[in-house]
Image (cartoon, rainbow, N blue to C red):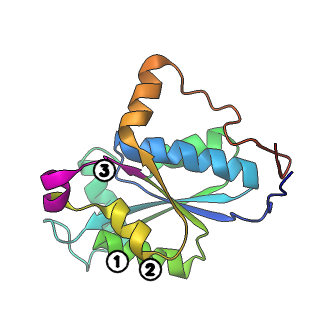
Amino acid sequence: MTVVDAEMYETILVPTDGSEGALAAADHAIDVAGRYGATVHALFVADTRMSPISSGMDREDLFDLLEGAGGNPTAPVIERAEAAGVAAVEHVEAGVPYRVIRRYVEDNDVDLVVMGTHGRTGLEHALLGSLTERAVRTLGVPVLAVPIDGARERAETGDGDTGDKSGVEDGTAT
């Protein structure tokens, strides 16, 4: 029997854009946070490489812009965490996503990053790149990549229960 460190994860980051994949990742992050008593940090990065966003925008300007575009992508993560009884905080910032994520991880002593992944391969992956892949290679903390297709498949078949999937119970592996 292996003993699991109950303080292994105290701060879990979920970078989100409000997409289906980000919400699938959030569900995993919330599940892990609930098991370890960790706090989920929902982070949305408004990409300054795309107009009309600029790095000089303050937090209120970003929230105004997001509201005009259909809402705050961190809100569903916070709502799901609160419904599960998990502590959560949100942060919205303008910048280049991978740079902001890296700085956030360092500044907030993040223990785990949970991100959705499209599972692109070949030319599509080479052309588009992957924020999740870059995170895995460069962050220096564990990154849990949640495949979007797997999350979609579980939702369609009704096999998306939130029961114990890890075999970890009361700090010990079973």
Residue, x 61% and y 69% (percent of image)?
Answer: 111
Q: Which circle marks residue 103 in the picture?
A: 2
Considering every residue shown, the one lying at the far front of the view is 1
Classify mark 2: helix, strand or loop: helix
Q: CA distance from mark 2 to mark 3?
A: 25 Å
Instruction: Find out whether the residues at labels 1 and 3 contact each other: C-beta distance under 8 Å.
Output: no
Q: Which circle marks residue 99 in the picture?
A: 1
Local crowd at mark 2 within 10 Å, few (<14), some, or many (≥20)? few
Q: Is residue 94 magenta?
A: no
Q: Is residue 79 visible?
A: no
Of pointers 1 and 3, the one earlier in the residue sequence: 3
Instruction: Find out whether the residues at labels 2 and 3 contact each other: C-beta distance under 8 Å.
Output: no
Classify mark 1: helix, strand or loop: helix
Give, as a single range, the part of the protein colored magenta.
116-127
User: On the picture, is 56 further left or further right than 117?
Assistant: left
User: On the picture, is 91 further left or further right than 4?
Assistant: left
For this rendering, which residue is in front, 126 or 17?
126
User: On the picture, is 21 further left or further right than 8?
Assistant: left
Q: Position of residue 42 (x, y in %)?
A: 49, 58
For this rendering, which residue is in front, 2 or 96?
2
Q: Amino acid at mark 3?
A: Glu
Classify mark 3: helix, strand or loop: helix
Q: CA distance from mark 1 to mark 3?
A: 24 Å
> Which residue is tagged 3?
67
User: On the picture, is 2 further left or further right than 148?
Assistant: right
Of pointers 2 and 3, the one earlier in the residue sequence: 3
Q: Is residue 122 magenta?
A: yes
Q: Is residue 80 visible?
A: yes
Up-down: is 142 above or below 22? below
Q: Amino acid at mark 1?
A: Arg
Q: Quadrant of residue 20?
A: top left
